[in-house]
Image (tube, rainbow, N blue to C red):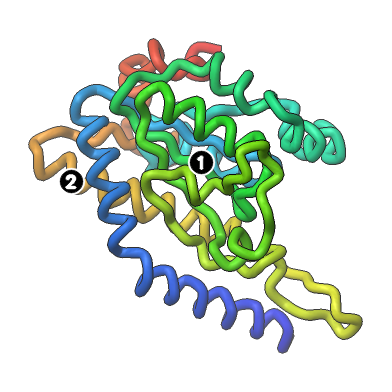
Amino acid sequence: MKHAAEYFANLHAVLDRIASSQPEPLTRAVTAITQSVARGGVVHIFGCGHTQMLALEVWYRAGQPAFISPVFDPGLWPQNAPLKGTELERLPGYGTLLARHHDVQPGEVAIIISNSGRNPAPIEVALNFKERGLQIVAVTSMDYATTVPSRHASGKRLHELADIVLDNAGPAGDASIALPDGRRAAPITTITNAALLGAIFLEVDFALHQQGIEPPVFTSVNMDRDASPNLSYAARYAGRVKYYVG
């Protein structure tokens, strides 16, 4: 199991790198989100392909807040034909269409997740939301994004458009371990992206408490305790988060 041990060691090193290098942008993201949520806002999260799993990770999830408004799109889910999803992520105008039909309010925060930050869909979502008065938090791999050109007509990558940039410290190409033939395996950024989001929302929970606001955090329905607050939390945000009502 030496290769698994190498993977775990790499993961620990990357998480340590994030913990030591990202306090400043994390603090800025937490402050922006706390201020918006305290005013009644929601947090919008968008990703493509497997990155879309991160929006699912923090939405209606035990221990996560109820004020998450994911920008889901079936066309970008890998199980709905991954080659088609790749084409849609690169299709000019597709991200703008998705963003235009998503409910946002000025002063809210959008978290856009893209490891390479180069494809049109996440860039267009970020641009549309920014034009509509949102603060943009990019979660990206700076080691990756700074080595590839943009595929968007603007020539910009996601990190060049965002108000706040969080580096997930993933390697270029995401895979973290070299195979004997030179190819690489063992992706890592699903874990580091989830860690960044978990850290953000944990800090937001405590920041809201400090302001005398009860953070609307979901409880696991599989625990032997009262989970009825989950229903009230979902009802509170149902007018803004369409997935709570179907």
Q: Position of residue 110 (x, y in %)?
A: 42, 35
Left or right of residue 121, residue 234 in this image: left
Per the image, the residue denoted by label 2 is: 207
Residue 112: give its label: 1
- Residue most toward the bottom? 2
Q: Residue at x 36, y 15 (%)?
A: 235
Q: Is residue 94 left or right of residue 21?
A: right
Q: Which label was assigned to residue 171? A: none
Mark 2 residue type: Ala
Q: On screen, 158 above or below 144? A: above
Dot 1 or dot 2, earlier in sequence: 1
List x then y, in percent, for residue 166.
Answer: 43, 56
Rendered location of residue 218, percent (x, y): 37, 35
Is residue 204 shown above or below 96? Answer: below
Give, as a three-letter code, the residue at label 1. Answer: Ile
Q: Alpha carbon of mark 1 to alpha carbon of mark 2: how far? A: 22 Å
Quadrant in which residue 208 is drawn: top left
Q: Which residue is drawn at the image coordinates 27% and 51% (left, top)?
A: 28
User: Which residue is drawn at the image coordinates 73% and 84% (left, top)?
Assistant: 3
- Mark 2 lies on a secondary structure that is helix
Q: Secondary structure at mark 1?
A: strand
Q: Nearer the viewer, mark 1 or mark 2?
A: 1
Residue 143, compared with residue 32, is above or below; it is below
Judge whether residue 64 can be spotted in this image. Answer: yes
Residue 142: % across, % down: 54, 63
The C terminus, quarter of image: top right
Residue at image coords 60%, 49%: 117
